[in-house]
Image (cartoon, coloured by chain):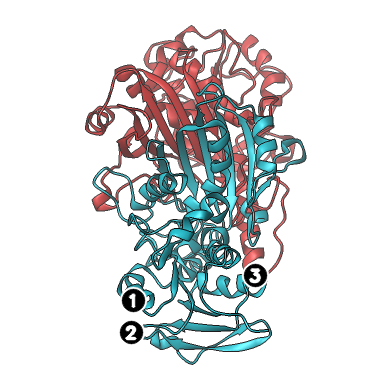
Chain colours: A red, B cyan
Amino acid sequence: MRVAIVGATGAVGHELLRVLESSTLKFDELQLYASPRSAGLKLPFAGQELTVRATPEGAIDADVILASAGGSISKALAPAWVAGGAVVIDNSSAFRYEPDVPLVVPEVNGEAALKHKGIIANPNCTTAIAVVAVAPLHRAYGVKRMIVSTYQATSGAGQKGIEELLEGTRVELAGGQPQAQVFAYPIPFNVIPHIDAFQDNGYTKEEMKVVWETRKILGDDSLKIECTAVRIPTLRTHSEAITLELERPATPDEARELLRQAPGVEVRDDPAARLYPMPLTATRKYDVEVGRIRASLVFDGGLELFVAGDQLLKGAALNAVQIAEYLQAKGALRGRVSG
Amino acid sequence: MRVAIVGATGAVGHELLRVLESSTLKFDELQLYASPRSAGLKLPFAGQELTVRATPEGAIDADVILASAGGSISKALAPAWVAGGAVVIDNSSAFRYEPDVPLVVPEVNGEAALKHKGIIANPNCTTAIAVVAVAPLHRAYGVKRMIVSTYQATSGAGQKGIEELLEGTRVELAGGQPQAQVFAYPIPFNVIPHIDAFQDNGYTKEEMKVVWETRKILGDDSLKIECTAVRIPTLRTHSEAITLELERPATPDEARELLRQAPGVEVRDDPAARLYPMPLTATRKYDVEVGRIRASLVFDGGLELFVAGDQLLKGAALNAVQIAEYLQAKGALRGRVSG
């Protein structure tokens, strides 16, 4: 079983290597691809050094391709990868909304991955983090309305986003004027309610991804969802305030109990002990932290919650590897594992 | 007409001096008070230097007292100030919920200030910023439900909050471990969904202040309001994502037009030109920036908006001075102005 990472040198690529090191996925070979200027770079993996190759124009001789090099590369090359026989788990938004491409969070709709036609899409990071917490509540109580406000880290824009925050912060602390190239405005000590392109309805594409993708993953197009997506000066981990109107009333205690049983969730919810979700504690954690669970004051029987999830892990690399693990566990991956 | 500031050396006190310099309020004398350890300090005001005195235990010989030294000092001393004949405009939460204490945002319910019995309360900063934008919409369309998620700056905790962020950020950039004394956890590059004390219902007092105070200012106890209040690593200006369900449907264009006429509001809402509210542009601005106005996707005829307001100004010092200006304009302030 041969695994390839396309986009191995990016922020998500880096996490894919780390997640694969401790993954239950069985494979014999790991190939790393990136842009030509990264070719020859050596990256550590499980005590070895692997050499990065330039992403070829055509097929890649691998059984699973974890693609995280951006939408345009996925769009251009994935058909050739599929034609070459690989299963492509794509972290970009290139294929997420195509009806015959499953959009998968394994804890929520893993079985959808089995119906793939070569490409499986990894959801947007904000959606993946929200849906791990919301899906169990939806199943038990039926979500009618969902209102999300996000607190998104700069690494959502990749390694260059982190660097722009760190460098800009240094400049600002020294009394200078931070630059903005990755973000629309300087992000140090600022808040920018603008992630991805604005759509005709006034929402950004990032906000609409949460609407479209949550509906697709939960398999319910009638869900009323809205989102305000906001970039803030943090390095890693997206937080989200989520309001839920429910078909059947839930108490915070019931919700807490249900979420304690839910895979991929860590209930961190004891205000008296100052336990609630935060980037400080959720960063580099596989589980999504869920807390501040309380009765909604605007929807009878509804809930308020706050979640924090490492968007490079559950929002990207971890979820992609978990899809591959799921497929392998179901015997749905080509490629023998030796030894 | 003699004005006194109690708490002159704090973050809000500093802003009170700046706002008074350009205020239309006519007064002959400005007295500055703070804790005994600040006594003797000289603070600049309108080209002069004023000496800070220790806040006395009893009455202060002034006509208007702008109090911003915290709830316990206001609670202990305001009765003596009132007995001494002063009108107290109090920035703490000590008296906000007392039925006979008006809670005033002049653009919204200035006339309530005229019914004072010595004390007028200045609202919580988050509430003041939200209500400037929401009140005109409430009057025109009737707000039924209001859901708020906040992005609150460290200066909401005073000058020491700013210093903890700046110093902690320096430490973290140098590879060290930032300390937390003002905030429950280190705030640099973090998000803390915990402002003020937790209440029995799981909401923080900061969150409930938005509920209680918005209802009191809008004079409508039936309003369904909820809030998630979150501290983020910014220096100044609170931002808020606000979802509104309305009695009568509003389009974004109608709301924008209405808000353009509203006092205290700057509509900053042209996504194509990258114009939206941000701390970067709202800081040190008197008006509250309102933007990202769009049709709600969960409430038919409802609205989504994003606001950013300098919480040391409209959320504190500016609003307090505007209350005094309002009273003076209505002839409701004791004290003659010479010259």
Q: Is mark 2 on a helix, strand or loop?
A: loop
Place of residue B6 in the rendered image (x, y in percent of width and height, measured from the top left)? 45, 77
Q: Residues within 10 Å of mark 3 (few under 14, many from 20)?
A: some
| Disc 2 chain ID | B
- For the N terminus of chain B, the image quarter is bottom right
Question: Residue B38: percent from the left, percent from the top?
Answer: 45, 86
Q: In this view, does B54 lie above or below B70?
A: below
Given the image, on which type of amino acid does mark 1 rest? Leu
Which one is nearer the viewer's eye here, B297 or B161?
A: B297
Answer few, some or many: residues within 10 Å of disc 1's Cα (few below 14, many 20 plus, some between 14 and 19): some
Q: As rendered, which of B10 and B113 lies closer to the eye? A: B113
Q: Which of marks 2 and 3 is nearer the N terminus?
A: 3
Task: Identify the image quadrant of residue A256.
Answer: top left
Q: State whether residue A194 appears in this view.
A: no
Residue B103 falls left or right of residue B310: left
User: Is disc 2 in the same subunit as disc 3?
Assistant: yes
Find residue B77 and name its label: 1
> Which residue is depicted at the point 49% across and 17% down?
A215
Q: Name the N-terminal-most of marks 1 and 2.
A: 2
Query: Where, quadrant-wise, is the C terminus of chain B in this rendering?
Result: bottom right
Mark 3 lies on residue: B23
Q: Marks 3/1: CA distance?
A: 26 Å
Rendered residue at 62%/67% (across/down): A173
Distance (Cα) linking label 1 and label 2: 7 Å
Whether residue A303 appears in this view of the structure is: yes
Q: Do the residues labelled 1 and 2 touch (CB within 8 Å)?
A: yes
Mark 2–mark 3 distance (CA, rounded to whole Å): 29 Å
Do the residues under discs 3 and 1 have CB atoms within 8 angstroms? no
Q: Residue at left 71%, top 18%?
A: A58
Residue at x 65% of width, y 30% of height: B252
In the picture of the structure, the residue carrying the numbered disc 2 is B57
The amino acid type, in three-letter code, at marker 2 is Glu
